Amino acid sequence: MAIGEKEQEIIQEFLLFEDWMDKYNYLIELGQSIPIIEDKYRNESHLINGCQSRVWISAEMIDGKMILKADSDAVITKGIVYLLIRVLSGENPNDILNAELAFLNQIGLQEHLSPTRANGLTSMIKQIKLYALAFQTKEN
Amino acid sequence: MDKNQQQLINQFPILKQKINKFPLVYLDNAATTQKPQVVIDALVDYYTNFNSNIHRGVHKLSQKATEAHEQARITVKDFIKASSSKEIVFTKGTTDSINLLAFSLGESMLKENDEIIVTELEHHSNIVPWQMLCERKNVKLKVIPVNDEGELLLDEYANLLNERTKIVAVGHVSNALGTINPIQEIIDLAHQYKALVLIDGAQAIAHIPVNVQELDCDFYAFSGHKMYAPMGIGVLYGKKHLLEQIQPYQGGGEMIESVTFEKTTYNELPFKFEAGTPNVEGVLGLEAAIHFLLKEDLNQLSKFESEVLNYATEQLNKISRVKIIGNAAKKASVLSFLIDGIHPYDAGTILDQLGIAVRTGNHCAEPIMNRLGIRGTIRASFAAYNTKEEVDRLVAAIHKTIDMFG
């Protein structure tokens, strides 16, 4: 499934929730299915700067696709990282670099997107794109 | 609710709004307080009626603005009981005040191997400017430790002092834990060693009446925006004879007496520290906030606050999974806490959804967080307009948060 299609799927899922609490409860639930980062990557160099909670994200290239894994010590943050991974993991670096990730606005998580927001969603996206750029450069 | 407090609350237009359909409960006052209508009106009045650049202008508007600006300086002087308005330097805020002082004192009075003492409780803005000075001048930074309750260990402080100690920089009230520090003892002890004392009053000025002459502190810094005044205005109080001895921080207009390419002489106090066009609206807003505090009576406001703080402490202590961080015997207006098993960020997010504004994280005070072995807290910080009913809303929201995260 392409990035855009996965984004649409998430938008549809979140349409079901009118109440903010249901939305956050769903996010909390989603966080539980995050592909957990391997212990060897759970270190300073995989820690995302600018987050109030600690977030680690790793990236590996397998058969030309970038595989992302992560973890966070905050549950809501974990749910948000899960959404990013669901949309971006398994895609090629070029598509990841071009992804606009408009779904985050559409599912009402825009408040997490401002550059100074404590959960550092912007920093997470930046880090994932940096991984993609590094892999792309290596391939070329 | 107290009738007087209701009358107070009514003066803050922003508090009438709803957040996520809930009436706003604003508990982030240690970050910034909201502004009463009189402060907002002062800014509008200035721009509507007499906006003009001050000092040196011959025209009426400039004269009026200059007079108002300098009258405000006298109001500040009276408010903190300084002996002269020359001792009141307007700055951008506490951070700016401390940077000014660290630079000017450093350049004028410090030499290699001198020592500066700060505390483990300090906000980064009362640590980093001193660290920068230490690097510039090869000066040593020493730190007064705290006990587990978040109280300074004065015995340790006494051991740190010696004839090389030149500056002691201490917060009046801790922004992270609310501890009221024994600044009188700290000042008196420092003076035995002829060390100068800066008190960072950012978290005290709206909560505790300050008398700089009685305290005998050498410098006292605070921000307008934490005392119901606008952002971008602050004060550095300094004893006149000390301010006279230290060199200016920034050069430019306003701060000079005469300029030639051969030599520039500096203006008199306090103008030599106020380079450039000043923040006139901020100064006038600050004056309006001081009038507001005097009219409402700071002692009465402190009474509202301590009642609410005590009530909140009592109520939060009843929640078995809540642990209050910082249990000093003397505290002002800050309640830091953790909920067992729930990340502060998660809790803060849910509280926000319920219309309750708190702050989460390390509160720009990483050293004290490290000392207590935590990464951050949830901080509810109170102002005079906060009520016990709002504390009840906070308590209910904490219960809801616990339900959500299990």
Image: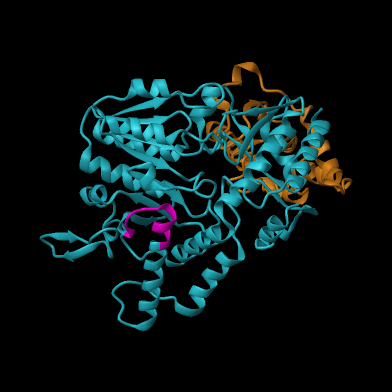
Chain colours: A orange, B cyan
Q: Is residue B324 left or right of residue A86?
A: left
> Is residue B272 visible to us here?
yes
Residue placed most toward the observer, B76 or B131: B76
Q: Is residue B203 left or right of residue B249?
A: right
Give residue B280's position: percent from left, percent from top. 42, 67
Question: Looking at this rendering, what residue extends furthest in the right direction?
Answer: A16
Give the residue drawn at x 46%, y 28%. Answer: B120
Give the residue drawn at x 67%, y 37%. Answer: B310
Give residue B401's position: percent from left, percent from top. 78, 35
The count of marks equals: 0
Give the residue drawn at x 48%, y 79%. Answer: B49
Give the residue drawn at x 38%, y 24%. Answer: B157
Q: Is residue A110 left or right of residue A5?
A: left
Question: Looking at this rendering, what residue extends furthest in the top direction?
Answer: A40
Predominant secondary structure, magenta span: helix
In reply to whether residue B79 is colored magenta, the answer given is: yes
Question: Looking at this rendering, what residue extends furthest in the bottom direction?
Answer: B59
Give residue B271's position: percent from left, percent from top. 29, 61
Residue placed most toward the observer, B315 or B100: B315
**Image quadrant assignment for residue B158:** top left
In reply to whether residue B68 is colored magenta, the answer given is: no
**Boundaries of the magenta span:** B75-85
Give residue B285's position: percent from left, percent from top. 50, 64
